[in-house]
């Protein structure tokens, strides 16, 4: 099939490459000429393991362009994977989606299913279809052209950053919301070579699956974080508690890792968006509201803990390990580092930070206020306290005795439970993590 994909972020590009890998001819469209040039050279504009080899492997069936008209005109399916960022009030901003829809309306010349991958509020796809078909009908009748069949399918995306390729090629499920047999058959053709479980449903239910899944996972994290906080007060160990819970298949062992809260491009945005919608319909989702509140508090957890050791961070050398919202990505969206570091700077801390790939992005926010280090050792040298915000493998594999050797005051506040706490017994290092007894 001839397929176009609008947007070459995580969702769009990975989808396009996976569809090319399944044998389709795919044109990826983006407004950013620089990104297009990179992709034409086989370079991925996003940091995502396994993506570049797959782009190379399928280069015969992949093309990249800023010329949306040529991509959309004769496409049998157009995937829309542009961003739906959060507005100030928590609702989703749909301007990028509507821009693409209007471009499709101006250019499409053949029967087509337009597949919305972007996370959009429930009911949006119905509105999109109305807007698109009205514009297409008006344009074609004005030009004296015969009608074409265009329908919207909702096909939410469940990939995680860092494992996006694996998550797409081996998705746990493919959810497709359509309103006709015609659209259903065309989507079956698109996904002919995919052998995961399919869930065919109406469009609104498909839209809801996305929000309900993400918010449930966010809720699970906030729940385990609250239990962790209680474990600290009651001298229990959250790792053991999570293990004991997770072996129950009804609970499952994933997304039970306590820490300093969830970040990234989805959970914070999607919890707020669903909460906003529920308020709009005067049926507030109290559990989702609680997940958001718990997460906001959790992100401040290490700073609060630091007051056990120092009244203020003023003048102290503070080592920060990890800047990104999770490992294996350079993404800083909603990362705990972005909330904590400005407060530390206000307190007068001297910050030395390390991250294997997040530094160039962090420099866009703080070009001069922080000393960026090229190794963990350099970061820890003479530090008075260390904050761990991301569980990078390099941090987890780091010899813990080096903290003692390098730091002036070896105090580690670990927001990601990177080490077994008993390893710190009798080391002279204060190791204060989440939901576990402080060891020294
Ligand atoms: C998430 C969803 O997993 C994915 O299905 C959806 O399409 C997009 O949002 P992503 O944001 O890439 O993916 O990362 P994920 O691995 O889910 O982690 C999100 C945040 O939750 C991270 O900040 C992570 O540190 C945190 N997290 C995750 C925990 O604190 N504990 C856990 O047990 C799991």
Image (tube, helix red, strand yellow):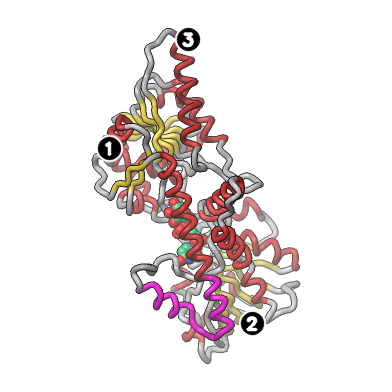
Split into 4 quadrants, where in the image is the C terminus? bottom right
Q: Which residue is mark 2?
A: 409
Q: Main secondary structure of the magenta part?
A: helix
Tag nearer the camera, 3 or 2: 3
Q: Are marks 1 and 2 in contact (CB under 8 Å)?
A: no
Q: Are marks 3 and 1 in contact (CB under 8 Å)?
A: no
Q: Is residue 223 above or below residue 162?
A: below
Residue 60 seen by the camera: no
Q: Is residue 123 left or right of residue 24?
A: right
Q: Is residue 184 above or below residue 420?
A: above
**Mark 1–mark 2 distance (CA, rounded to whole Å):** 61 Å
- What residue lies at 39% left-to-right and 25% top-to-bottom? 150
- Looking at the picture, tell me which residue is in the foreground, 428 or 170: 170
Q: Are marks 3 and 2 in contact (CB under 8 Å)?
A: no
Quick one: label 3 or label 2, which is nearer the N terminus? 3
Q: Position of residue 322 (x, y in %)?
A: 54, 65
- What residue lies at 66% left-to-right and 55% top-to-bottom? 366
**Mark 3–mark 2 distance (CA, rounded to whole Å):** 76 Å
Q: Is residue 346 left or right of residue 71?
A: right
Give me the disc on residue 188.
1
Disc 1 residue crowd, few under 14, some 14–19, many 20+, Cα 10 Å: some
| Residues drawn in magenta | 225-247
Give me the disc on residue 142.
3
Magenta region includes residue 334: no
Residue 355 seen by the camera: yes
Quick one: label 3 or label 1, which is nearer the N terminus? 3
């Amino acid at each position: 099939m001839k397929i176009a994909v609008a947007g070459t972020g995580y969702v769009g590009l990975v989808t396009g490459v996976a569809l090319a890998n399944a044998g389709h001819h795919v044109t990826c469209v983006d407004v950013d000429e620089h990104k297009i040039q990179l992709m034409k050279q086989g370079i991925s504009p996003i940091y995502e393991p396994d993506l570049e080899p797959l782009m190379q492997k399928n280069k015969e069936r992949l093309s990249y362009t800023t010329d949306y008209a040529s991509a959309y005109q004769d496409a049998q399916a157009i995937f829309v994977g542009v961003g739906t960022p959060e507005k100030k009030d928590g609702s989703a901003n749909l301007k990028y989606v509507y821009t693409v829809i209007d471009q499709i309306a101006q250019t499409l010349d053949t029967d087509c299913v337009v597949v919305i991958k972007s996370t959009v509020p429930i009911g949006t796809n119905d509105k999109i279809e109305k807007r698109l078909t009205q514009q297409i009908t008006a344009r074609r009748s004005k030009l004296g052209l015969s009608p074409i069949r265009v329908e919207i399918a909702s096909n939410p995306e469940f990939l995680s950053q860092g494992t996006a390729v694996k998550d797409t090629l081996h998705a746990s499920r493919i959810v497709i919301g359509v309103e006709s047999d015609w659209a259903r058959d065309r989507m079956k053709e698109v996904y002919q070579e995919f052998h995961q479980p399919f869930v065919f449903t109406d469009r609104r239910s498909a839209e809801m699956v996305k929000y309900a899944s993400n918010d449930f996972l966010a809720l699970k994290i906030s729940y385990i974080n609250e239990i962790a906080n209680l474990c600290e007060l009651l001298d229990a160990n959250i790792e053991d508690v999570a293990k004991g819970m997770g072996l129950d298949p009804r609970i499952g062992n994933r997304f039970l890792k306590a820490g300093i809260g969830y970040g990234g491009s989805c959970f914070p945005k999607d919890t707020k968006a669903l909460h906003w919608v529920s308020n709009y319909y005067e049926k507030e989702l109290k559990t989702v509201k609680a997940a958001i509140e718990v997460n906001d508090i959790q992100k401040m957890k290490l700073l609060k803990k630091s007051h056990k050791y120092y009244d203020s961070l003023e003048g102290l050398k503070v080592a920060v390990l990890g800047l990104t919202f999770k490992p294996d990505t350079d993404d800083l969206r909603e990362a705990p580092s972005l909330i904590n570091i400005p407060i530390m700077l206000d307190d007068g801390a001297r910050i030395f930070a390390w991250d294997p790939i997040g530094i160039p992005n962090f420099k866009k926010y703080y070009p001069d206020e922080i000393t960026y280090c090229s190794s963990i050792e350099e970061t820890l040298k003479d530090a008075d306290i260390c904050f761990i915000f991301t569980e990078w493998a390099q941090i987890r594999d780091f010899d813990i005795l080096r903290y003692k050797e390098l730091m002036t005051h070896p105090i580690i506040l670990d927001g990601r439970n990177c080490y077994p706490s008993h390893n710190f017994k009798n080391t002279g290092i204060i190791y204060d993590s989440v939901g576990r007894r402080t060891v020294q």
